[in-house]
Each structure stands twice: as C-alpha cells, then as structure tokens.
Image (spheres, rainbow, N blue to C red):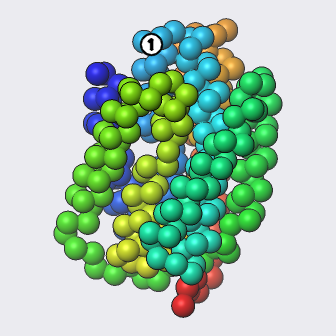
C-alpha cells in the first residue's frame, strides 16, 4: 500500500511539473525531467527500507537494464513521429521497449558494473542513431484541460500497472515497472496537440536525461551493501546531480529550426 500511495502521489506531480517546464523551456526539458529518478529513486528507497539492502541492490541492477528499454522506446518513437501520427509512434516505441527488455535479460545475470557498461554504451549508440535534433516550432496555445488530462491519464496508467503487477508475478512485474509511462504521456500529448517536432523534443530530452539515472542506480546497487541505505542513496543523489548538470548543458545547446515532418 505504501508503494502504491508513493506512485500515485508522485505521478501527477512529476507529469504536471514536467509539462509546465516543457511550456516554459521547451519539450526537451520536459523529457529530460521525466528521465530523472524522481519516482524510481524514492521507490527504490522504499524497497530498500522494506526489503533490505540485498534485495534493493538486485532491484537497482534490474533498473539499469530497464533504462535500455526506455532509450529504445525514445529512438523508435522519434523516428516514427517524423512520418506517422502518435498511435503508430506509440506502438512502435512500445515495441522497441519490449525488444530491448528481452535482449537485456541475459545480461542481468552478470555483475552490476558490466550491466552498467553494456547498457551505457548501448544508450550512447541509440542516442547517436536518433533523428537529428530540430528546434520545435513556437508553442501554440493549449487548452486548459491539457495538463490536468496528462496527470489523470498518467496516474490511471500507473494504477493499472501497479494492480496488474500484483497478479503477474515478480518477472512480469519487473517488466511492467520499467515501462516508459511518463514520457509516453508527455510525447503523445505533445504530438497530438502541438505536432511531431514537440514530441521529438520530448524523447530527445529523455535519451539525454537517462545517463544521469543510470549512474544513480549504479551507485545504489554497488554501494548499498557495503555502505548502507542512507549513505548509498546520498552518494547516488550527488552523482546524478553532477551528471545531469552536464547533460542539461548538452540539451540546451542551440539547434537549427526545422520541421521534422511534412
């Protein structure tokens, strides 16, 4: 119950905050924000307090693998959004996530540092394969119901996933936990209401922002047993802040104005 309440509390806050940031600083910043471990980090801490350091270390290592699925989702959605509408882009993104989640499963049996290295290199390759960055058109006025609707849809999806996880067992629950719910909501709403350039910005921000999150979980999975829960999470927070300060500068570099779709 505590984990469910945590998700249901943080989900609307995160989606609403990322949506407001996207309006203020651009869609890529919204995607970058939902890549941060703002929900997965507290959930990992809750698991550590509830199940112990050993269990939490394994969960954090699994989260490293799950991030590859998020990067694959962003790559597939970005390319499809250049030619198709949001339904096909979302379906293709979810297929990319599923393929990556299956491919990474054998790797999760190896040491955490090796999992990190493989996933980090793969994420860098996927970022290089992403569509060329473009500056989205000037944002259009959006309806008043936009952000509340994003929050409601995102929370409903998280609730459905959480309820299903209790029925499907540990392995399928782990797959469901890694689903890119937040970026899906942001990308689809941006795609539908503002166009493909805005959606491309969201998924590009996600891909860049994921590098801080993977470092966060590496620190947690390697440090939690020797150092304990509080020191390991504190060190992980410092590490993600350092990486994200660099990734945000990369994200904010000027890019050419162009349209990604006819």
| Residue where numbered disc 1 is placed | 49
Furthest toward the left, the residue is 144
Rendered residue at 74%/24% (across/down): 109
Q: Nearer the viewer, residue 130 or 142?
A: 130
Q: Is residue 243 visible?
A: no
Looking at the image, residue 232 lies above or below residue 95: above
Identify the residue at image location x=19%, y=69%: 144
> From this viewpoint, is residue 107 visible?
yes
Side (left or right) of 71 relative to 190: right
Q: Is residue 223 left or right of residue 35?
A: right
Image quadrant occupied by the N terminus: top left
Q: Is residue 31 above or below residue 132?
A: above
Up-down relation of residue 99 to residue 127 (above or below): above
| 8 with respect to 134 (left or right) | left
Toward the viewer: 38 or 231?
38
Q: Which residue: 49% across, 57% down? A: 31
Q: Secondary structure at mark 1?
A: helix
Quarter occupied by the C terminus: bottom right
Residue 60: x and y in percent read: 59, 26
Q: Pick whichever, 2 or 23, lies toward us.
A: 2
- Neighbour class for label 1 at 10 Å: few (<14), some, many (≥20)? some
Drawn side of residue 125 relative to residue 40, left or right:
right
Q: Quadrant of residue 87?
A: bottom left
Residue 73 image position (x, y, % from top left)? 58, 56
Residue at 28%, 36% (x, y): give it: 9
Residue sticking out furthest to the bottom: 262
């Amino acid at each position: 119950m505590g984990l469910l309440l945590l998700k249901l509390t943080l989900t609307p806050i995160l989606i609403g905050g990322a949506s407001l940031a996207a309006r203020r600083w651009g869609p890529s910043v919204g995607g970058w924000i939902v890549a941060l471990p703002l929900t997965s980090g507290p959930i990992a801490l809750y698991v550590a307090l509830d199940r112990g350091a050993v269990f939490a270390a394994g969960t954090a290592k699994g989260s490293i693998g799950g991030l590859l699925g998020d990067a694959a989702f962003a790559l597939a959605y970005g390319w499809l959004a250049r030619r198709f509408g949001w339904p096909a882009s979302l379906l293709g993104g979810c297929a990319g996530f599923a393929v990556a989640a299956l491919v990474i499963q054998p790797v999760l049996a190896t040491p955490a540092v090796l999992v990190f290295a493989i996933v980090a290199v793969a994420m860098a390759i996927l970022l290089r394969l992403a569509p060329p960055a473009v500056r989205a058109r000037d944002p259009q006025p959006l309806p008043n119901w936009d952000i509340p609707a994003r929050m409601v849809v995102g929370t409903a999806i998280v609730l459905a996933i959480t309820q299903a996880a209790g029925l499907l067992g540990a392995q399928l629950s782990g797959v469901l936990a890694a689903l890119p719910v937040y970026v899906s909501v942001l990308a689809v709403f941006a795609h539908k209401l503002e166009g493909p350039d805005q959606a491309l910005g969201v998924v590009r921000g996600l891909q860049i922002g994921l590098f801080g999150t993977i470092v966060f979980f590496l620190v947690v999975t390697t440090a939690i047993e020797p150092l304990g829960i509080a020191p390991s999470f504190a060190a992980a927070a410092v590490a993600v802040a350092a990486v994200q300060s660099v990734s945000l500068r990369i994200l904010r570099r000027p890019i050419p104005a162009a349209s990604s779709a006819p």
